[in-house]
Image (tube, rainbow, N blue to C red):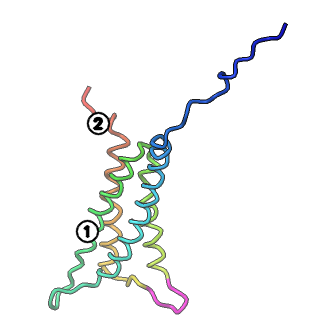
Amino acid sequence: MRPAIDDHAAVAPPVRSSDTVAALLPPIILVALVLDAFITLVLEVLYLPTYLGATAFPVTGVLAGLVNVLLVLGARSVSSRTSAMFLPLAAWTFGFLVCASAGPGGDIMLSSDWRTVLLLFCGLVPPLILIYFRVNAGLFAKH
């Protein structure tokens, strides 16, 4: 007598392409948000020394805070992990430090004045406050 072999027991259910796309989409979006952080930093540094007549008008310093908050919210919509929310902000900070350091020819893209401090402060503080309140949302909830 031969034992009966079930040929269908080892067959895995078919994988739909929509499941594969749904699994790959969040990391792709996070990579796009990190690249967006670098691109927006380049534009913010480029337009930081803008003048309106004879008055310095660093509007990109204020826009940096808004854009970085939107990047953090975009990362939050893809993943609920705190580390994922920090990725665009970490990329922006790394790019800022690269722009603040001297290049091979001694050129520095960010000068040592109040506009650079404004860009750093406005670019980091609003998204960090947002991350703080999102992470500690349970602490501030009414019981």
Residue, disc 2: 140
Decide: is 74 above or below 111: above
Label 2 residue SS: loop
Q: Where the C terminus falls, by quadrant?
A: top left
Residue at the (40%, 60%) spot, across then down: 33
Label 1 residue SS: helix
**Foreground: 112 or 25?**
25
Decide: is 43 above or below 130: below
| Residue type (three-letter) at the residue carrying disc 2 | Phe
| Residue 40 picture quarter | bottom left
Query: Looking at this rendering, what residue extends furthest in the front direction?
Result: 1
- Specify the segment rendered in magenta: 102-108
Residue 63: which numbered mark, if any? Answer: 1
Query: Looking at this rendering, what residue extends furthest in the left direction?
Result: 53
**Foreground: 18 or 37?**
18
Query: Residue 49 in the image: x percent, y percent?
Result: 28, 84
Residue at the (37%, 84%) spot, across then down: 111
Residue at the (33%, 61%) spot, across then down: 68
| Residue type (three-letter) at the residue carrying disc 1 | Leu
**Foreground: 4 or 132?**
4
Q: Please check the rendered image and state whether residue 104 is part of the magenta-colored stretch, yes or no.
A: yes
Q: Earlier in the sequence, mark 1 or mark 2?
A: 1
| Residue 50 picture quarter | bottom left
* In this view, the mark in front (1 or 2): 1
**Foreground: 21 or 71?**
21
